[in-house]
Image: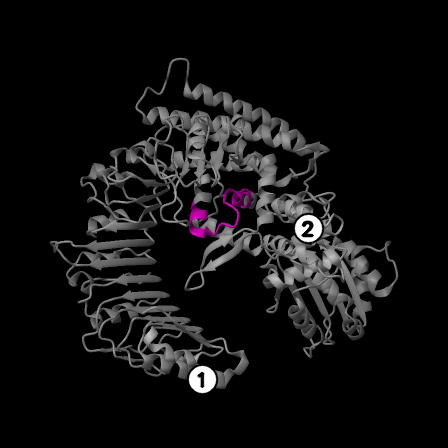
Amino acid sequence: MAAYGALLSLMHIIDTLQKHPSPPISIDTKQVESLTQILTFLLEFLDAYISPVVVDGREADPLERRIADAVYAAEDVIESQIVVQINKRSPIVEGHDFYQDLQKKIEELNLIKIEVEKIAVEARPQQNSVPGLTSSSTVKENVMVGFEEVFLEVLDKLTGDQRNRQIIPIVGMGGIGKTTLARNIFENEHVKGHFYIRAWTTISQTFNVRETLREVLSQASGVSSSDLSEEELGEKLYKFLYDRRYLVIMDDMWSVDVWRKIKFFFPDNNNRSRIIVTTRQSNLSSKLNESYRVGMSFLDDASGWDLFCKTVFGKENCPLELEKIGKDIVANCKGLPLSIATIGGLLAKSEQTREYWKRIEQNLNSIVISNNDEFCLKILRMSYINLPNYLKPCFLYMGVFEEDRSIRVSMLQKQWVSEGFLTARSGKCFETVAQEYFKELVDRNLILIDKLGSIGNVKYCKIHDLLRDMCLKEVIRDRLYHVIRDDLDEVNNKRRVIFPNETSAVFMREVLGSLSHARSIICDYDERGKARVPHNLRLLRIFKAYDNSLAPWFGGDYLLDNVFELVNSRYVAVRVRKKSQFPTSVELLWNLHTLVIDCSDDLIAPVEIWKLHQLQHLVFESREVILPDPPSGDNNIVIMKNLETLKGVKNMFLSEEVVKRIPNVKKLYLKYHSVKKMEGANCLSYLQLLSKLETFRCDIEDVHDEYLQRIRFPHSLKKLSILAPSDLELEDIMPKIGSLPLLEKFLLECGFFKTGKWETIEGQFPSLKFLQLESCGGLRDWIVKEGSHFPCLEKLRLCYLRRLKELPSAIGEINTLKSIELEYCSESAVMSAKKMVIEHEELYGDQLEFHVRVNVGKNEAALKSLTSANFEVNVGNR
């Protein structure tokens, strides 16, 4: 995928230079046209003709490498000239002419294009054909452990009273046990007696409609029909199934296209016929127009151990001296049945000693990947091979992160954008495309959801260890990135370099001097000394030495002036040393997309920061930055139309002039602290002019409350968080917030209710899903009358509301409400929440999905007796 990623990256550079209002260099129009034509052709060729295995009997990899190397060479010429020009040197250096050098690279690319055209004429499109790969249906053992409840659930659906034909998708990642579950259902005696006809067919990646129909007809009728056409087979199958109750299992379906072509041959005669489809793609079930599906999850520890023991010892018990290390091995398989079965199969045939098992545990993933290559690796690799090319670089990039890393989704998507992995889609920004790519990989069960936000958005994700190891194995061949170990001699000319967690700072500094061609450096190492970026990294685009998804003080201290010498930067995430200066050279970063700075002291940004045309995300962690007013004068006005995130800004005066400079900002975090009353104290009223704003957080401390009293919110807001001064009268501001039509999440801390009463008005908070009130002084009575209040509310969290008498009974009648959390609230409020649970239990019994969690202080420990299945009480230290 290095070739595909390189082509996308170079096209992105050319496009950016063409559209930038003040590009650092210009490329001749004819050269742009030639490059664009060649790059577009090669991308189309890779999509249509090059299989990851073979093209026209030849290894495809050497050709891909030639394409990648030629593209990289052209990229080097362009970006090196950008560095020269920005550093205010002459565009023509002795013995060097930019346009001549670029023309030579274009001619080299054109020669490859001519050669590829010949291949394209001779070769037929591969259509993702992957010779020799076996389907997951090759699993010979049908030991089913841990899925007993799912088995009974599916069995009930198969034999239930619903008379119309039903399609039942079984969904999960490769190796999760879909085929094993389906096979156990297929062989079940009750199922055999219920259906007159049973048939099993494997669809796989390269489906053949005629062969699928022939296989089902042969199993159904017992008669071979190899001489019939596709249409004749379909007609004969339809007639044979017409008056019979049938069960057909279609194993390993990769595309809905196969179903669309054969569905007409499976009659629906209201005789309770069923079709089971196993697939790795979660979104396939919706395309099959079925509301019911079976989602396969990982095994828990007990089920994993059970499967392991049955695989290794059969009906015997595990020897006591091997039990602990055996359980450690199972735990390291992370609940994936394929991994457990593969390692168990190896141990069943090997010496059963602690020493040998310990060696297996230490090398678990490499053994699972390499052992029985025709089975385990190929099952996992099928998911990768079947990906469309545009998703492959994004998936392989998941190997960049450490094992078991919980990865912040927003950060991951920003890196995809900055790496140039994304294909432009009509009318969509790259951020939206990245979100779509992420969803596709989740739907294909290649990326796992790790943590959801309070309104159901995916905040963190993970990748299974085996899939991560497969990524690392693939990139050795594809050269998409290089993980540094102790191979100093192999780092020359590497484009993307990853320094793992265990890399020493001394070794890292030694290696950095050899990375003059590097475009991305990602360093995950815990070194708290100050560091400088070597001057030879002039072509660097991504420098990530700080990760805000890890511990707050992870990574070394860098000098901003040194970092900002990297003029081709797109993504910079660093922690800066104390008293670091924010240099004016930031304006040289002509193509900067994302800047994340973790600072131990407040920073004052230079006015030049308002000149960053391409900036999309400006984030300051731990402490805040002070932004100056934008420069005035027609010649200096820069509209930062790409800016979407502005986080960690202190005492920002939102004038009309400032708002005009950031018209498309979607996420804004501001803090006002110890600021004197400014002239025109209604500065926050200009917030309403930000018509694209979706997320706003405002912390106001030691400031006169009129800043918030005069605030005007845009109707586009979806998330709102306010830390208010303790003297802010909330009765005045709550109606403004309640009227926001799209607001889904609202957090309010501090402020006070002067009257002691909060009464919501009819029709307020129409879209709110999550509400949190914390330390709101004076609140005694919360009044919610019958009607359309909070019609979408799912989660309610109340903290430190010691005077609140009770929760409104109308809250308990909201159909969408799933949970209530009370943190150190009054005892009477706790009792009212308990009453809601009792009423829900009486209505819904065991089907209740509504839960309440309560934290109380030690002096209220007696409330622990209220604990029940849906009402949890925890005693804290307060």
Image quarter of residue 793: bottom left
User: Looking at the image, do the residues carrying marks 1 and 2 touch, with CB atoms under 8 Å apart?
Assistant: no
Q: Amino acid at mark 1?
A: Ile
Left or right relative to 736: residue 555: right
Report helix, strand or loop for mark 1.
helix
Near mark 2 (Cα within 10 A), the count class, few <14, some 14-19 or many ≥20, is many
Q: Main secondary structure of the magenta part?
A: helix
User: Furthest-front residue in view?
Assistant: 321
Out of 383 and 432, give the one closest to the viewer: 383
**Residue tagged by mark 2?**
343
Does label 1 or label 2 sit earlier along the sequence?
2
Kindly identify the residue that appears in the image at 61 percent across and 27 percent down. Answer: 114
Residue 423 location, x and y as percent? 50, 43
Q: Is residue 398 magenta?
A: yes
**Residue tagged by mark 1?**
838
Residue 813 location, x and y as percent? 41, 81
Identify the magenta region: 393-414
Residue 655 location, x and y as percent? 19, 51
Q: Nearer the viewer, mark 1 or mark 2?
A: 2
In what quadrant of the picture does the N terminus appear?
Answer: top right
Q: Is residue 266 magenta?
A: no
